């Protein structure tokens, strides 16, 4: 009798020969599965990127088209207003653009309305569920009127940083509007409104210029300055006068003005 292991090489060879095809088959299957998975992930990522790029481009086209349409509509309204009053013209521009910062150059007879606009769009992701993104652009809407001619619009895309003071002023205008809504009737004085807007007396963003009542309303003129002090805008906030009924948010209006 041969010692253990002396006669086993033939058995081991037969076992190895029987296992080798199975192992190779399993390895090939694993490679194919892994390759298919990686190919699917690559294609899904490529397709998602392609779709998202197309949607973003559509959003860019949309925001530029909206800006041009708003500029044209505003110019038509300016020409239809048949007024030379700068405050009224400022109101027309604000109504059509919603710009929080509107300036007027008297020497050039030119308005500039600055605001940041955003258009959202849906995105495709590898993980089911999707998501969203947005295109943001900073615009200068310029309306000029040479002597004896009609108002003509021009739209300029600016760097995002240029719009930050305007965006800040827009936020502060909403804050001022909300605080004026809550002011008690007896506090509708210059001192009372200033205290409501700046309770601590340490802010430099709100300066109340005047509080005037008449025709069932109270008009509050305020100078709003951005936090960094880079821009300022006069605002006129109107609300029902005391005794004219309950004050609702919709009855209080905060709009840019040429002077305060």
Image: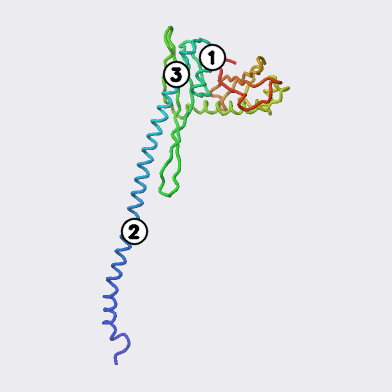
Q: Quadrant of the C terminus?
A: top right
* Residue 216 against residue 5 in the figure, above or below: above
Residues at circles 1 and 3 in contact by the CB criterion of under 8 Å: no
Classify residue 174 as left or right of residue 144: right
Q: Which residue is mark 1?
A: 88
Foreground disc of the pair 1, 3: 1
Q: Which residue is mark 3?
A: 142
Name which of mark 3 and mark 2 comes first in the sequence: 2
Which element carries disc 2, helix, strand or loop?
A: helix
Occupied quadrant, residue 222: top right
The percent position of residue 120, horizontal first and vertical second, equals 45, 35
* Residue 8 against residue 161 in the figure, above or below: below
Q: Which residue is mark 2?
A: 34
Question: Could you classify mark 2 by the number of other residues whose Cα lies within 10 Å: few (under 14), some (14-19), or many (20 or more)?
Answer: few
Classify residue 135 as left or right of residue 189: left
**What residue is rendered at 65% in x and 15% in y?**
215
């Amino acid at each position: 009798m041969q010692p253990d292991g002396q006669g086993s090489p033939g058995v081991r060879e037969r076992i190895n020969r029987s296992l080798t095809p199975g192992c190779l088959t399993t390895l090939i299957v694993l490679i194919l599965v892994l390759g298919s998975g990686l190919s699917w992930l690559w294609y899904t990522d490529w397709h998602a990127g392609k779709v998202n790029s197309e949607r973003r481009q559509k959003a860019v086209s949309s925001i530029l088209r909206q800006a041009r349409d708003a500029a044209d509509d505003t110019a038509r309204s300016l020409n239809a207003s048949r007024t030379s009053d700068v405050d009224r013209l400022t109101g027309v521009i604000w109504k059509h653009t919603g710009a929080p910062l509107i300036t007027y150059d008297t020497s050039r007879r030119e308005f500039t309305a600055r605001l940041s606009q955003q258009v959202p769009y849906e995105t495709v992701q590898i993980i089911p569920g999707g998501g969203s993104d947005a295109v943001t652009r900073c615009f200068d809407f310029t309306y000029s009127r040479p002597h004896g001619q009609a108002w003509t619009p021009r739209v300029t895309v600016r760097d995002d940083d240029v719009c930050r003071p305007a965006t800040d002023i827009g936020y502060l205008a909403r804050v001022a509007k909300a605080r004026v809504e809550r002011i008690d009737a007896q506090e509708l004085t210059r001192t009372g409104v200033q205290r409501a807007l700046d309770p601590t007396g340490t802010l430099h963003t709100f300066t109340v210029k005047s509080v005037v009542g008449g025709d069932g309303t109270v008009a509050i003129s305020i100078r709003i300055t951005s936090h960094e002090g880079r821009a300022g805008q006069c605002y006129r906030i109107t609300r029902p006068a005391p005794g004219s009924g309950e004050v609702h948010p919709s009855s209080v209006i905060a709009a840019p003005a040429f002077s305060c």
